[in-house]
Each structure stands twice: as C-alpha cells, then as structure tokens.
Amino acid sequence: MTKPLYQQVILDLQKQIREHFQPNEKLPSERMLMDQYDCSRNTIRLALDDLEQRGLIYRLHGKGTFVASILLNQFDLGSMYSFTQEMKELGRNPITFNLTLELFEAKESVLKQLTLEPHSKVYLLKRLRMADDEPMMFEETYMPAEVFPDLTMEMVSSTPLYELMKTYYQQTAVMAFEDVKAGIVTPVEAKILDTPEQSACLKLYRRSINDKNVPIEYTKSVARSDKFVYRTKQVNRRVLTGDQNK
C-alpha cells in the first residue's frame, strides 16, 4: 500500500537531513520544499511538524527551520515510527524475534493501563529487537483479548504488529502516551540483551489508543542506554521573542 504523501515527504526529508545536512544548518523554505516535492503547504507543514516533534529539526520564528544540533545519529525512541522502520532508514538490518505469546488473566497494573474489567484476559507478547545481529531492546506487549481475539504466534511472526492490528482487527493506534525512566537491567534482561548485569538502561512504558479513545496496547520496553537516546525539546521563548525581562 502506498504511504500518504506527507509520510513520503517525512521519510525523504529525514533521510536528507541525516545524510546531507550539518547540525544547525538551515533547511530550504516551505515554498522551496513545496516545489521540490510538488505538494501543498499543508503537506509540508505536517511533515515538518512531525520532524520537529521528534527532535530532528527546530524552528526559529522569522528565521526559518534548522537541523537539530546534536544526537542526529542516535536512535530516537520519542517517535511513533516503528523500530523496524527506524533501523532500515539508518541503513541497519532490523530483526525481531518473537519469544513467546501467552494468554492469561491480567494483573491489576495491566488492567488499569488498558482500562479493562477485573478478570479480563490479555495476550502477552515478548519480543527481542535486534539490529545487525546486535540485541537492542526487549519488549513485553499486552493486548486485550477482547479486542484481538484468536491472536496467534503465526500471525505476529508473519506481519508487523501495528499492521496486523489494522489488517486483521481494524484497530489503528492514533496516539501513544509514554513514560521513560532510567533504570538497571535485571539479570534476565541482561542475558537477553547480551549486556553486563547492573548495566544502565532506558525503561519505557507505552500505552496506545485507537481512534475511539480505547487503549489497545500496553508495552514495557527495556532499551540499552548505550544504543538509544530519548529526545525532547525545550524552547526559551523569552529569548526567541526578545522578551528577556519577564
């Protein structure tokens, strides 16, 4: 299926930024980008909004759009893009190993995240994400059985997870809430990620919502801190507006 035009622009701009631009270098104007991609201003703005939210670019009012100054080659966890897509765009070979898929009665903490009734059942999918044969991230994904009935390992092994949700179950994640904190890998996680015990890691807790505002996924991820960065942006609005005395 062909990607929407604004997503095609996002992917190409992201590639151009990483391969041909220097930190703090100014990007072409919106008008120039409209001509380059033969699309509307709204399409360009949607693409730039996405890149800005993910920390690849920043905007200065009246001056233009610029490439972010640091961390361009780190893997960005603050993104709705999939791990597989991110690795491919960086020229790496992504591999996902689906370790186990279980159906069981959810414990209270998972019920709360997925707003389920007591005794509701969920699927738990455990996955190891790798790039160029290097372990990168270990994930535990919980999905409500009532939303994804008859889910099988064969299904999750043959189709990317979000594509599977959409194709088989007509469920599309339109929003995600994430909490990120620093942590230490457990002995089990250290073994899975092939990293020393007591190594630092990033722990992510992600809850995805569908277009009806219903939680459809809760994922706990452990990412090697030597391989990932979680990027945010803060703007000093007083400096940008010239009002530094308030």
Image (cartoon, grey):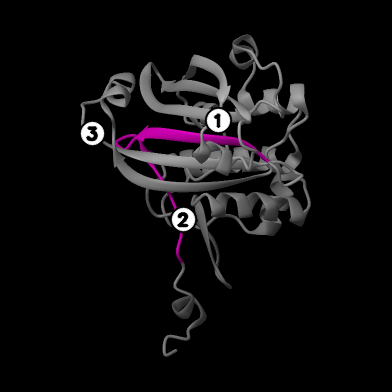
Q: What residue do we see at 42% from left, 21% from top?
A: 130
Seen from the viewer's position, the closer of residues 30 and 50 is 50
Q: How many marks?
A: 3
Q: Chief secondary structure of the magenta span?
A: strand
Residue count near mark 2 (Cα–Cα under 10 Å), binned few <14, some 14–19, many ≥20: some
The first of marks 3 and 2 along the sequence is 2
Please identify the quarter of the rendering in which residue 13 is found.
top right
| Picture coordinates of residue 30, whole percent (x, y) | 67, 58
| Picture coordinates of residue 192, whole percent (x, y) | 33, 20
Nearer mark to the viewer, of 3 and 2: 3
Residue count near mark 1 (Cα–Cα under 10 Å), binned few <14, some 14–19, many ≥20: many
Seen from the viewer's position, the closer of residues 110 and 58 is 110
Point out which mark residue 25 bears: 2
Please identify the quarter of the rendering in which residue 183 is found.
top left
Question: Quadrant where the C terminus lies?
Answer: bottom left
Disc 2 secondary structure class:
loop
Nearer mark to the viewer, of 1 and 2: 1
Question: Quadrant where the N terminus lies?
Answer: top right
Seen from the viewer's position, the closer of residues 244 and 25 is 244
Q: What residue does disc 3 label?
A: 199
Point out which mark residue 106 bears: 1
